[in-house]
Amino acid sequence: PAATDYQAEDAALSQATVATNHTGYTGTGFVDYVNVTGSSIEWTVSAATAGASALTLRYANGTTINRPMDISVNGNVVANDLAFGGTGSWDTWQTATVNADLAAGSNKIRATATTDNGGPNVDRLSVSAHGDTERPTV
Ligand code: GCU
């Protein structure tokens, strides 16, 4: 199934910075959240038509503590405290997927840390084609 990748390092960052100090990322780097509640990444994603898509975040968490984030689409939370558990090391990446409706045209997809640990390191967001909520191959 077709999916479009949106690199985290190209998104709008709040209390988060682009980093390259771990291996295995795609694109030119990844995003390291500041360790505070409310730090966020916001992607602008375009959808040809309105409908459900699978939103897949590729992340690393080298701790053993969950780093949950709220996922919102155009300001509406579509996943509360989505879990981003430990991946074994900061060089080991896994994915978390949520299905959500996108509007036709431009959409703002935001991942906001909900604990004082901040978010995990995030490599990219993959958005499946409209109507295809199957998890993309990553
Ligand atoms: C380490 C790691 C960072 C990570 C940070 C964190 O410093 O090198 O990549 O973002 O821990 O706890 O968030």
Image: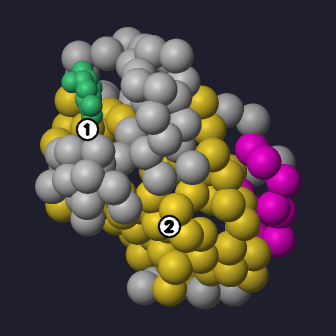
User: What is the number of the mark on residue 32?
Assistant: 1
**Does the beta carbon at disc 2 come under 8 Å from ligand 1?**
no
For numbered disc 1, what is the local secondary structure? strand
Residue 129 image offset from top left, x and y in percent:
73, 62
Mostly what secondary structure, the magenta segment? loop
Classed neighbour count for the residue bearing mark 2: other residues with Cα under 10 Å, few (<14), some (14–19), many (≥20): many
Q: Residue at x 30, y 29 (%)?
A: 28
**Does the beta carbon at disc 1 come under 8 Å from ligand 1?**
yes
Q: Note whether residue 95 is visible.
A: yes
Quick check: 41 left or right of 104?
A: left
Q: Residue at x 47, y 66 (%)?
A: 70
Residue 37 image offset from top left, x and y in percent:
26, 60
Q: Is residue 106 above or below residue 46?
A: below
Classed neighbour count for the residue bearing mark 1: other residues with Cα under 10 Å, few (<14), some (14–19), many (≥20): many
Residue 41 placement: quadrant: bottom left
Q: Is residue 110 above or below residue 8?
A: below
| Depth order, front residue of 60/132 | 60
